[in-house]
Amino acid sequence: MIMLKIVLLLISLISAGVAYADNSIYIEQIGTSDDTTITISQDGDDNVVNISMDHDDNTLDFTQKGNDNTISWVSYWGSGKVWGGDLDGSNNTFTIEQNNTLGSDSNRVGFHMPGDDNTIHVCQGATFSSSTDTTCSGSQSQEYGGHTINLDVHANGNNIKIGQETGTGNADHYAQIYYYNGDNNNTFITQKGNGDKDLRMDIRTDGGEQEIMQKGDGEHTGVINLQGSYHTDITLIQQGNTAQSYSLTQNCQTSGGCSVSVTQGN
C-alpha cells in the first residue's frame, strides 16, 4: 500500500504541466495487490520506469514523451525483482506509449514475462492498424523514430502488439522477441516509416499466430527461428523501395505442420 501511494504522488507531480527530466520510478509489486491500476506519464529526457510484479488482473498505462527514455529495460534476464523488468502475474493489461523528438535511437522497452494470459500493447512512435487494432494510430509529425523493444516470454496465452513508426526522422527500429516454455502466444508487429527495421524472433513454443509487417524506406531485416512441435502460423510482409531480407529456420515436427507466408515488394 505504501508503494502505491508513492506512485500516485509521482503521477500528480508529472501531470502538473511541467516537463521533468532524469526522473526514475521503481515499482515492486509483491504480496497481495491484485486489481490495481497504475498510470504514469513522463515528459522529458532520460526518464526511467522499472517495474517488477507478480500479481493478477492489473491495468498499467505508461507514457513517455522525449528522448533516451526507458521502461523496465534490462540487458539480461533473471528473477528481476530488484532492478525491474519482470511481469510474473496473469491476466494483466499493459499499455506503453513512447515518442522520440530527436531520433536518438535510444527509447527502450524490455520485459521478462513468466505470466500467462497477459495483454501487452506497445506503441513506439505509434501504429497497429489491425489485428484488430486497439487504438494507437499514425505517427506524429515530430516523431523521429529510434526505438528498441526486447521481450522474453516464458508463458502461455499472451497477446502482444508492437508498433514502431517514424514520422519526420529516419532513425532505426529494433524488435526482439523470445518465446520459450509456453504455448498459444499471439504477436502482431508493425514497423513503419524511414530508417532501417530489424526484427528478431525465436519461437520455441507451439500454437499461436505471429504477424509482422515492415513498411517504408530503409533496409528491412527479419530473422525468425521456429522450433515448436505443433501448429504455428507466421506471416511476414516487407514493403518498400530498399533492400528486404529474411532468414527462417524451421523445425516443425507434426503432421499439422507450420504455416509460413512471406511477401516482399513495393
Image: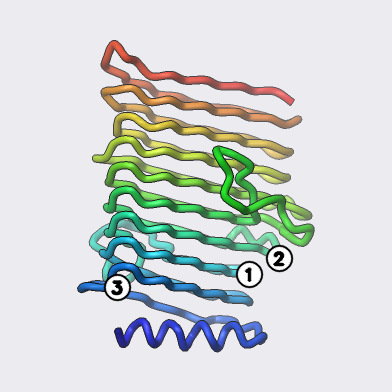
Disc 1 and disc 3: Cα gap in Å? 25 Å
Residue 178, placed above or below residue 150? above
Give residue 20's position: percent from left, percent from top: 61, 84
Residue 53 image label: none
Dot 2 lies on which element? Answer: loop
* Residue closest to the far left: 31
Quadrant of the frame with the N terminus: bottom left
Label 2 with label 1: CB-CB less than 8 Å: yes
Q: Residue at x 42, y 58 (%)?
A: 93
* Type of amino acid under label 1: Lys
Label 1 CA crowd tier, 10 Å (few <14, some 14–19, many 20+): many
- Residue denoted by label 3: 29
Label 3 CA crowd tier, 10 Å (few <14, some 14–19, many 20+): some
Q: Residue at x 53, y 48 (%)?
A: 162
Decide if residue 121 is on the left or right side of residue 263. Answer: left
Q: Residue at x 60, y 35 (%)?
A: 213
* Type of amino acid under label 3: Gln
Quadrant of the frame with the C terminus: top right
Q: Nearer the viewer, residue 84 or 128?
A: 128
Residue 101 image label: 2
* Residue closest to the far top: 255
In which quadrant of the rendered view does residue 56 lie? bottom left
Dot 3 lies on which element? Answer: strand
Label 1 with label 3: CB-CB less than 8 Å: no
